[in-house]
Image: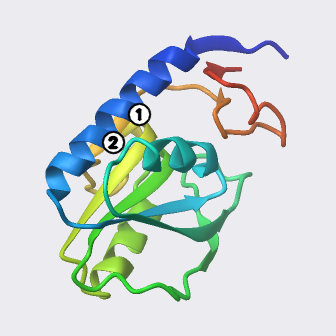
Amino acid sequence: MTVKVLYSEQQIQKRVGEIGSAIREDAGEAGVVVIGILKGTTVFIADLIRQISGNVRYEFIDVMTDVSDTETAAALEINFLAHFPIAGQKVYLLKDVVSTGVIETYLLNQLRQKGPKSLNLIALLDRPELRTVPLEVDWAVFTVGDGTYVGYGLEHDHRYGNLPYLGVV
């Protein structure tokens, strides 16, 4: 299988830096909570939190999806026991690929019930043409079309997540 480079390591780092700066500007002097949805955001969250100055805390949510159902990305299980407080906090939810918006909408609704001061959605890759529910991404590293994406934490068939760039197979 061949991987075609879509975004280089330098392009990714430039955009992640821009989003880190935008988060700090949005939050002002307040502390921020960055929540990554496992496992596709692990590389992204590591790079992003180092680009946000000041007080930053990070947490993870585990979402298991039915990988055979690529059209609807139906969630099989959401491990959301939120052992971390977010009431009154500036919260930023990270998702690797936002497509239908179903999982993200559910998680955002659950997080809103915890009383954050603000709540924003950030996508590594945004695929707005696949939305089945109304959902806006606050910041996207990149907006992409159809394809199977790998690298920078994104895996295909349990491979390619270690690539330092984003590619398409």
Is any atom of residue 162 visible in this view? Answer: yes
Contact check, label 1 and label 2, Cβ < 8 Å:
yes
- Measured as percent of width and height from the top left, residue 167 is found at 63, 20
Q: Quadrant of residue 139?
A: top left
Please tell me whether residue 26 is drawn above or below residue 66 in the rendered image: above
Please tell me whether residue 166 is drawn above or below residue 86 in the rendered image: above
- Measured as percent of width and height from the top left, residue 32 is found at 31, 64
Seen from the viewer's position, the closer of residues 108 and 127 is 108
- Measured as percent of width and height from the top left, residue 123 is found at 41, 44
Residues packed near mark 2 inside 10 Å, few (<14), some (14 to 19) or many (20 plus): some
Coloring scheme used = rainbow
Mark 1 vs mark 2, CA separation in Å:
6 Å
- Identify the residue position indicated by label 1 in the image: 16
Secondary element at image label 1: helix
> What residue sits 64% from the left and 20% below the top?
168
Secondary element at image label 2: helix
- Identify the residue position indicated by label 2 in the image: 20
Seen from the viewer's position, the closer of residues 84 and 167 is 84
Q: Amino acid at mark 2?
A: Gly
Q: Amino acid at mark 1?
A: Val
> What residue sits 47% from the left and 64% below the top?
103
Quadrant where the image shows the C terminus: top right
> What residue sits 48% from the left and 24% below the top?
12
